[in-house]
């Protein structure tokens, strides 16, 4: 599942393949931009912004994409087989003399003026992996709605940008509270370290092919994806429940011993 670290990696792959080169192939397979043609233009840069990707092209244009749950950008050399999924899932093809970038299952793909990028990403809070990172603003944003469950506040990209559902569960574990704790009730020592802890986790993972929050080999995550398996710290069985505001429920993992705080009732299995 793409989170800030994955998007950062995708942006770098795309940047390395496309930036500074003239596009010789351009194919946007979404109805609104099907006739847009970017060939002949040089790609200036590819920048991640939270979980959004901005591909800036000569002439003041930006191709904005978002990977959401299972989108991906792959880069291929000439003659290499495209293997990111069936052809009907391809949403974008951008190529130059040496490489071709193929975007699969992109739920968001739009071409916009670079000066209008704020329309796509202006709502985002400080970017955990971006040059605008501001831990004080991120914390102030998180605490703005003190009654909101910590897990939901962390996922809200308007507070801070880059945390997805995996890092949400892992961060709550590292902070020693359940994801249902009202964010305003987080002890002061822990809320003070939250923004930098989040940034370190993403920073640590932005170069890694496999996400790791434990610093241990072979045990990559403390709780995420480990329902009914023993907590790496205390051996209590990890629990799983959905968390969300009703519109979108996300699987959420926690250790009931290491993480005190409110939690939904989960029947014993
Ligand atoms: Zn535990």
Image (spheres, rainbow, N blue to C red):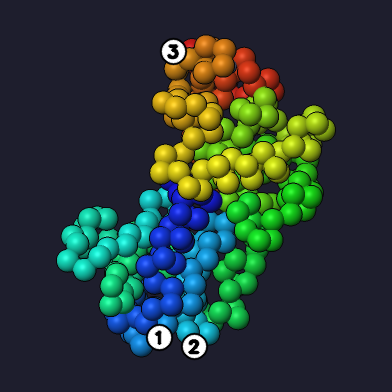
Q: Are marks 2 and 1 in contact (CB under 8 Å)?
A: yes
Please provide percent x and percent y for residue 36: 37, 84
Does residue 173 lie above or below 45 as drawn?
above
Q: Residues within 10 Å of mark 1 (few under 14, many from 20)?
A: some
Is disc 3's CB within 8 Å of ligand 1? Answer: no
The residue tagged 2 is 59
Indicate the quadrant containing the N terminus: top left, top right, bottom left or bottom right: top left
- The span from disc 1 to disc 3 (Cα, nearest Å) is 59 Å
Q: Secondary structure at mark 1?
A: loop
- The span from disc 2 to disc 3 (Cα, nearest Å) is 59 Å
Residue in the image at 74% along x and 37% along y: 193
Of the numbered discs in the image, which one, if any, rests on residue 255? none
Residue in the image at 61% along x and 34% along y: 171
- The span from disc 2 to disc 1 (Cα, nearest Å) is 7 Å
Q: Secondary structure at mark 2?
A: loop
Residue 221 visible within the image: yes
Indicate the quadrant containing the C terminus: top left, top right, bottom left or bottom right: top left
Residue 164 lies in what quarter of the image?
top right
Q: Residues within 10 Å of mark 2 (few under 14, many from 20)?
A: few
Q: Secondary structure at mark 3?
A: loop
Of the numbered discs in the image, which one, if any, rests on residue 269? 3
Which-is-in-front pick, marks 1 and 3? 1
Q: 97 or 253, which is in the foreground?
A: 97
Please provide percent x and percent y for residue 152: 63, 41
Of the numbered discs in the image, which one, if any, rests on residue 41? 1
Q: Quadrant of ligand 1?
A: top right
Q: Residues within 10 Å of mark 3 (few under 14, many from 20)?
A: few
Q: 35 or 269, which is in the foreground?
A: 35
């Amino acid at each position: 599942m793409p989170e800030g670290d994955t998007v950062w990696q995708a942006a770098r792959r795309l940047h390395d393949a496309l930036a500074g080169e003239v596009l010789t192939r351009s194919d946007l397979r979404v109805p609104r931009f099907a006739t847009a043609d970017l060939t002949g233009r040089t790609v200036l840069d590819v920048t991640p912004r939270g979980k959004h990707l901005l591909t800036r092209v000569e002439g003041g244009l930006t191709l904005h994409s978002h990977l959401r749950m299972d989108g991906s950008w792959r880069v291929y050399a000439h003659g290499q087989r495209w293997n990111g999924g069936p052809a009907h899932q391809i949403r974008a093809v951008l190529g130059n003399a040496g490489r071709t970038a193929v975007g699969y299952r992109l739920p968001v793909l739009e071409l916009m003026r670079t000066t209008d990028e704020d329309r796509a990403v202006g709502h985002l809070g400080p970017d955990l992996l971006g040059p605008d990172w501001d831990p004080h603003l991120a914390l102030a944003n998180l605490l703005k709605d003190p009654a909101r469950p910590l897990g939901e506040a962390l996922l809200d990209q308007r507070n801070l940008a880059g945390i997805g559902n995996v890092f949400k569960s892992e961060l709550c574990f590292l902070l020693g509270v359940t994801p249902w704790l009202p964010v305003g009730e987080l002890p002061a020592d822990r809320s003070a370290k939250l923004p930098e802890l989040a940034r370190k986790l993403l920073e640590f993972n932005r170069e890694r092919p496999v996400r790791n929050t434990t610093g241990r080999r072979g045990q990559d995550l403390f709780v995420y994806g480990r329902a009914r398996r023993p907590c790496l710290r205390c051996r209590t069985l990890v629990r799983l429940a959905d968390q969300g505001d009703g519109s979108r429920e996300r699987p959420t993992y926690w250790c009931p011993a290491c993480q005190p705080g409110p939690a939904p009732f989960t029947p014993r299995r």
